[in-house]
Amino acid sequence: MKILSNKAKCLLCGDVITSTNEKDYVYCQCKALAVSGGQVAILRLGHHNHFVELSEKDYS
């Protein structure tokens, strides 16, 4: 599997945030969600009911 984009939408503030580097943590405006991992891993900090996964993957 190849990660094409690593992003999620916070359901509390509406921000869509994207991680572009495997070692960054990008937080939404209300700090309830962070994404990390870039194109290496899909990592999330936050409650699973507070975000929608928007990452795109290629399984070919």
Image (cartoon, rainbow, N blue to C red):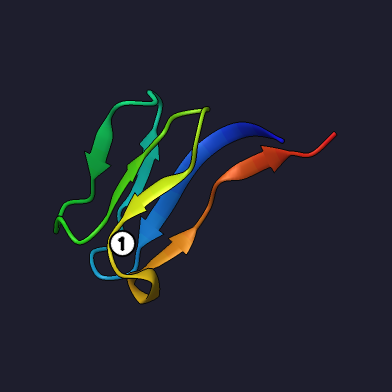
Closer-to-camera residue (60/56): 60
Q: Residue 55, image x and y in percent?
A: 55, 46
State whether residue 17 is above or below residue 30.
Answer: above
- Quadrant of the rendered structure where residue 23 is? top left
| Farthest residue, direction left | 30
Query: In the rendered view of the protein, which quadrant contains the N terminus?
Result: top right
Mark 1 surroundings within 10 Å by alpha-carbon count, few (fewer than 14), some (14 through 19), many (20 or more): few
Closer-to-camera residue (28/42): 42
Does 26 sit left or right of 48 as displayed?
left
The residue type indicated by label 1 comes to: Gly
Q: Residue 50, image x and y in percent?
A: 33, 71
Does 10 sit left or right of 28 as displayed?
right
Q: Residue 27, image x and y in percent?
A: 22, 45
The residue under the point 40% across, 26% down is 20
State whether residue 29 is above or below residue 49.
Answer: above
Residue marked by disc 1: 14
